[in-house]
Image (cartoon, grey):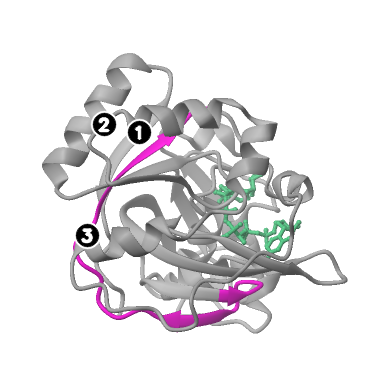
Amino acid sequence: MTMPLTRREAAPAKLNLTLHVTGRRPDGYHLLDSLVVFLELGDVVTVAPGPLSLSLTGPFAQGLAAEPDNLCLRAARLAGREARITLEKNLPVASGIGGGSADAAAVLRALDARPERLEMLGADVPACLASRPVRMQGLGEILTPLPALPPLHVVLVNPGAAMSTPAVFKALGQRDNPPMPKHLPDFTNAEALVDFLRDCRNDLEAPAIALMPRIANCLAAIRDTDALLARMSGSGATCFGLFASAADAKAARDRILGTNPDWWVAASGLAPAKV
Ligand SMILES: C[C@](O)(CO)[C@H](O)COP(=O)(O)OP(=O)(O)OC[C@H]1O[C@@H](n2ccc(N)nc2=O)[C@H](O)[C@@H]1O
Ligand SMILES: Nc1ncnc2c1ncn2[C@@H]1O[C@H](COP(=O)(O)OP(=O)(O)OP(=O)(O)O)[C@@H](O)[C@H]1O
């Protein structure tokens, strides 16, 4: 079946505000408990009628090949659909902010397709399809929508190197860590949210730093600004700072870039919720 219309779909970056690894299944996959939000910043997918194909544009296009295993193509194939897909790759590849999963989810939204066995595309794909703040549990398939969050402003900092998600999980020492509290409080303002987040963790941060010590430099650079909190997202290497205002976030971005011109540094707000 071919698409009748050209559709453009945002693929917002995913941010794990927390990432508790609470166990490991016999098949090697890990049980997670994570607060996930999505950003204004992201890739952009365009889907047009025609036989299945992929073109890459954007600043990080060179980090990817339009190969059959690209998650955009895998998503269309899983949905059993033909389409000419263009991917504007604005997010660094293999960086812990869900780029490939976000792209796969955007292709599915653009095609109005919800194939079964979504998890075959990646643990983050169900959350990226929702593309709204969620508590993510299980392997990534148990999603509980979060009540409205206060406005949040973030700075993302990546040292310019790809990180392998399986390698980070493999390097994790303690695999059965405490989950987040069963009931989450109401986050009435940014301060309340940040207070809660301070008592939470990203359990993949320590093993990721052991594999790539530059991540600690990214965190130190964020802590050297007005950031309310500094943490790594996903399996890294991207780290984030949380800020009270867009102006504070932009000032921190400029300051970090000033001293680290080789890093990828970006400021963003949260994505508007999808319907
Ligand atoms: C770490 C997170 O970024 C948190 O949001 C995600 O769980 C990873 O999501 P993803 O990149 O879509 O991950 P996948 O492509 O499904 O898995 C990559 C690898 O991560 C490990 N993996 C992933 C998810 C999970 N719940 N347990 C795991 O152990 C497995 O070694 C797997 O082979
Ligand atoms: N469209 C795509 N965008 C990014 N990576 C892709 C894409 N398609 C396939 N990949 C492959 O998927 C791997 C993971 O890339 P991705 O950018 O999704 O990682 P990530 O940001 O660490 O994701 P997560 O936070 O979900 O772990 C890379 O090795 C890359 O080659």
Residue placed under numbered mark 1 in the picture? 222
Residue at the spot 40% in from the left edge and 75% down from the top edge: 4
* Mark 1 nearby-residue class (10 Å; few <14, some 14–19, many ≥20): many
Q: Tell me the tag on residue 191.
A: 3
- Which tag, 3 or 2, sits closer to the chain's start? 3
Residue at the spot 87% in from the left edge and 71% down from the top edge: 26
Q: Spatial distance from mark 3 to mark 2, Cα to Cα?
A: 17 Å
Residue at the spot 42% in from the left edge and 74% down from the top edge: 134
143 in the magenta segment: yes
Q: Which residues are magenta?
A: 137-160
97 in the magenta segment: no
Please identify the quarter of the rendering in which residue 149 is found.
Answer: bottom left
Q: Are marks 3 and 2 in contact (CB under 8 Å)?
A: no
Residue 9 is at least partly visible in this image: no
Task: Describe the element under mark 1 as helix, strand or loop.
Answer: helix
Q: Are marks 3 and 1 in contact (CB under 8 Å)?
A: no
